[in-house]
Amino acid sequence: MTDSLDQITSASNPLIKRLRGLERKKNRNETGLFLAEGARLIEQAMAQGWEIETLVVSNTGADRDYVQALCAEAVKSGARVIQVPDRLAGSIARKDNPQAVIAAIRQQDLSLSDLDPSHPGLWIGLYECRDPGNLGTILRTADCAGAAGVLLIEQCCDPYSVEAVRASMGSLFDVRVARTDFAAFNAWRKNAALNIVAASVNGDTRHDGVDFVQPSLILMGNEQAGLPPHIEAECDTLCLIPMRGGADSLNLAQATAVMLYEGWRQRGFS
C-alpha cells in the first residue's frame, strides 16, 4: 500500500505549506480544515463520519500494519494519502516526535437548529471560554459523562485549534458542538424549557443542592471574569462549588467536571 503513496520530500511543496498553515485560525477558517494527530484519533473521526481530506504518513510509520490499514480506509473514503520524511511530519505537527499519521479533517460547524433539545443528557454552555486546553478537556469530560452537547457562546476559543483537539483526546469527534451568541442561545433554551444552572461566586445554593434531574444546562463563565451580571440575571439558578479556602477558584475544566458529574450522579449515572 505505502509503495503507491504520493511521496513529498520538500518543505516548499504547496500542500505541505497549506497543512503547516492550519496551526493558524485564519487558515483554518479559510480552508474549513483542521489537524488531528495519531491513528486512534483519526480512526475515531472516520468512524463518526468526519471527512478526511488529506492523510499524512511519516516514513517511520509507513510500514506499520495499522498505518497501512488506516491508509487503505482513508483512500476508500476519498482522502488523498501522502508519505513524507519524519522531519516534514514534525514540521506539520509542530512537534519533534510526531505521531505516525496526521490528518487534515473537514470541520463540522453546527448551529442551534442542528441540536435536539429533547436529548436526555445534560447540556453544557461555555460563555467566552478562552483557553483551548480547557475547552478540549471539557469536551473529553462531556463525552465521558454522556452530555447532550456543548454550546460555545459569544467569543470562545476555536475547538479546532491544535491544542483543543489534542486535549479532547478524540472526544471532539463524539460530542456535538455548536457556536452561537447569547441571545439566540437563550431563546433556544427557553423554547426547549431547559433550566440554566450557572456556577458563580454570587451563588446561594451549593452545587449538590441543585435539581439536575429536570432538563438542565450547566453554564460556565470565562476563566478570568466568570459570567457578567446581565448573563447571570437570565439564569434560573446560581450555585457555588464548596471550597475550604486557600485557592480562591477551581480551573474552568475542573469546575465543569464537578458540576457535570454531580448532575450525572443525580441521574443515576444512566
Image (spheres, rainbow, N blue to C red):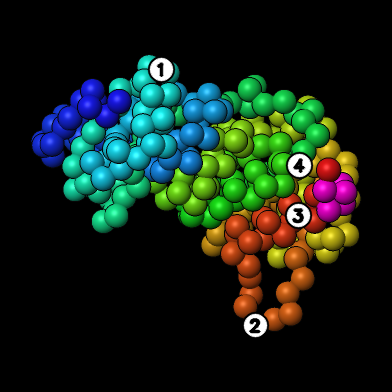
> In the shown orientation, is residue 141 left or right of residue 57?
right
Mark carried by residue 261: 3
Q: Identify the residue position indicated by label 1 in the image.
A: 76
Classify the position of the C terminus by image quarter. Answer: top right
Q: Is residue 36 magenta?
A: no
Quick one: label 3 or label 4, which is nearer the N terminus?
4
Residue at 63% of width from left, 70% of height from top? 249
Q: CA distance from mark 3 to mark 4?
A: 10 Å
**Residue 80 location (% of width, % of height):** 30, 22
* Pointer 1 or 3: first along the chain: 1
Whether residue 201 is visible, yes or no, is yes
* Residue type of the residue flagged with mark 1: Lys
- What's the magenta region? 265-269
Which amino acid, mark 3?
Tyr
Question: For the residue labelled by badge 3, is the local secondary structure a helix, a strand or a loop?
Answer: helix
Residue tagged 4? 122
Residue assigned mark 2: 246
Quadrant hosting residue 72: top left
Residue type indicated by callout 4 = Leu
The main secondary structure of the magenta stretch is loop
